[in-house]
């Protein structure tokens, strides 16, 4: 086994120190968008034991009035991508037209979507246990132009 030269050891230590500095800076000042150097808030927070648990989904309504689930199979867009950009969709609901376009591309024989919406299903939790009750909240909605 070969030993590292002084120069090689210094280069490795410098790279390690730089990586740690970026990790600490990302943890202190970063956001989840700075992956993998961000703060990983998804793992560092939790809801109170009797707080409702959110379950976000995207759904559409076609020209026949049928509600269509717009998950990854139907659109090619992962739910995490929608959740991560939810504030952008709320600020500009017209961006949901891209979801309708992705659905049309993957399902050319399906009825045209006239509405796309982001819905959060709030599951009731009491003392850390599901209650079996839930409510749906439409947080963003886009209507196709006529």
Image (cartoon, helix red, strand yellow):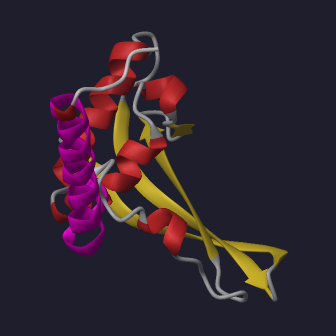
Any part of residue 146 in sight: no
Percent from the top left, x then y, of residue 132?
84, 72
> The C terminus is located in which quarter?
top left
The residue sitting at 28% across, 66% down in the picture is: 24
Compared with 73, 9 (above or below) is below
Residue extending furthest toward the top: 109
Percent from the top left, x then y, of residue 9?
25, 36
Compared with 98, 134 (above or below) is below
Magenta region's main secondary structure?
helix
23 left or right, relative to 77: left
Compared with 51, 9 (above or below) is above
Q: Magenta segment: does it hold 33?
A: yes
Percent from the top left, x then y, of residue 105?
33, 15
- Where are the magenta residues, as a range? 7-34
Q: Which image quadrant is residue 12 in?
A: top left
The residue sitting at 53% across, 65% down in the picture is: 43
């Amino acid at each position: 086994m070969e030993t590292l030269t002084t120069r090689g050891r210094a280069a490795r230590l410098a790279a390690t120190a730089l990586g740690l500095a970026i990790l600490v800076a990302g943890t202190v000042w970063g956001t989840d968008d700075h992956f993998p150097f961000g703060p990983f808030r998804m793992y560092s927070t939790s809801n109170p034991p009797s707080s409702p648990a959110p379950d976000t989904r995207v759904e559409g309504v076609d020209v026949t009035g049928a509600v269509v689930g717009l998950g990854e199979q139907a659109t090619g867009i992962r739910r995490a991508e929608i959740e991560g950009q939810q504030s952008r969709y709320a600020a500009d609901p017209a961006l949901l037209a891209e979801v309708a376009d992705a659905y049309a591309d993957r399902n050319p024989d399906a009825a045209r979507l006239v509405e796309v919406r982001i819905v959060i299903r709030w599951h009731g939790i009491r003392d850390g246990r599901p209650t079996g009750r839930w409510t749906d909240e439409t947080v963003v909605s886009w209507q196709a132009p006529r």
